Image: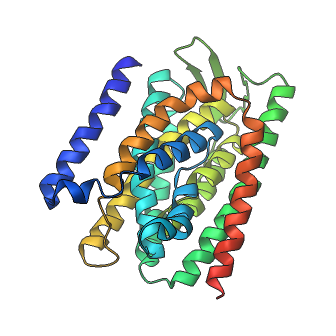
Amino acid sequence: MRNQRIFVFALVPVFWAALIWAQGRSIEFWLEFWWMFPIAFLIALTVNTVGISGAALFVPFFVLIFPLLAQELTALQSVKLGLVTESFGLSSSALAFLAFGLVDRKIALAAILGALPFVLVGAALSTYLPESILFIMIAGLLITSVILVNFEKHLHKKRRDEHEQDVVDLRVPEGEQVELVSHAGKTYRYCRTKSGFRTRLAGYSTGGFFQGAAGFGIGEMGIVAMILSGLPTRVAIGTRHLVVASTAIFASVIHVVYAGAGSAPIPWNIPFVTVPAVILGGQAAPYMAAKLPTVLLERFISVLFIAIAISLLYLAFL
């Protein structure tokens, strides 16, 4: 685990060096938005503690709040900034789950391959969508996220009540039996089935489209699909992190390519500051989650999402 943290934090100087090498610019340019560091850290700490996608808060922040503090950003720039920032934060948490042994790599690979075409379609289509449509999509996703996150909590509670929190033994004759042992020594037993594959494909393909177009959605839709397909909750959460990180990176690359073609260029001095903040926040979140009751935080996030969705709908119909 310590080596994983060293690798994650080593990404920061590499990322900085790549940006400076590619664009040059003065130190004043790169530190123009230094004040975004504590904001990005708090957002990353909050979303990772609750277990939702970082872009679910970053995209609305860049749309609604950032213009009040600094400069106007287009909806597409906000999506790109949310994806780039989220990619680093999710990669940090995905590596942690891999190191802990809570990832079903076969299911993760199938979900990634199934989602990528939809991520590509969503990312390509977003460059042609009017801002009002993007606002409506983001607002719809925020409301959907509230519903899905609460549904996920209901599923998790149901399994806990049925004494299936640590060991889930769901055996289907035609399924592939799996026994996964975490580094903490806990055993998880479940089946990989064709019906489960179809359930996950439906969740990740739909979520993948929104991930590419609006910057988030695959995590919220994917985690519910994984739990419904019979995966133990903790394995579903760990596997979800790897899927979301991979698709977020892919969507970011697509958007960067489009940005290089002159479509809504990314102001790179913003992620220059936000990326190290979310990496730090992602590593600190497990300690925060262990000490704080997350119920109040989850309720706050739900209310915040609904308020943001209403604001975005108001902007869309102005």
- Tell me where residue 104 appears, x and y as whole percent: 52, 32
> In this view, which residue lies farthest toward the bottom?
318
**Quarter of the picture holding the N terminus:** top left
- Is residue 113 placed above or below 62 in the rendered structure? above
**Quarter of the picture holding the C terminus:** bottom right
- Tell me where residue 68 appears, x and y as whole percent: 51, 69
> Across the whole image, how many numbered discs are drawn on residues?
0
Residue at figure coordinates x 44%, y 76% from the top left: 74
Horizontal side, residue 230 vs residue 32: left or right: right
Does any portion of residue 198 appear in the rendered image?
no
- Tell me where residue 111 appears, x and y as whole percent: 51, 49
Q: How is the image coloured?
A: rainbow
Work out whether residue 85 or residue 114 is closer to the camera in this orientation and state it: 85
Does any portion of residue 178 appear in the rendered image?
yes
- Tell me where residue 202 appears, x and y as whole percent: 62, 58
Residue at figure coordinates x 44%, y 23% from the top left: 99
Horizontal side, residue 101 vs residue 120: left or right: right
> In this view, which residue lies farthest toward the right?
161
Work out whether residue 182 or residue 253 is closer to the camera in this orientation and state it: 253
Residue at figure coordinates x 42%, y 67% from the top left: 70
Work out whether residue 207 or residue 178 is closer to the camera in this orientation and state it: 207
Residue at figure coordinates x 67%, y 65% from the top left: 308
- Is residue 285 placed above or below 23 in the rendered structure? above
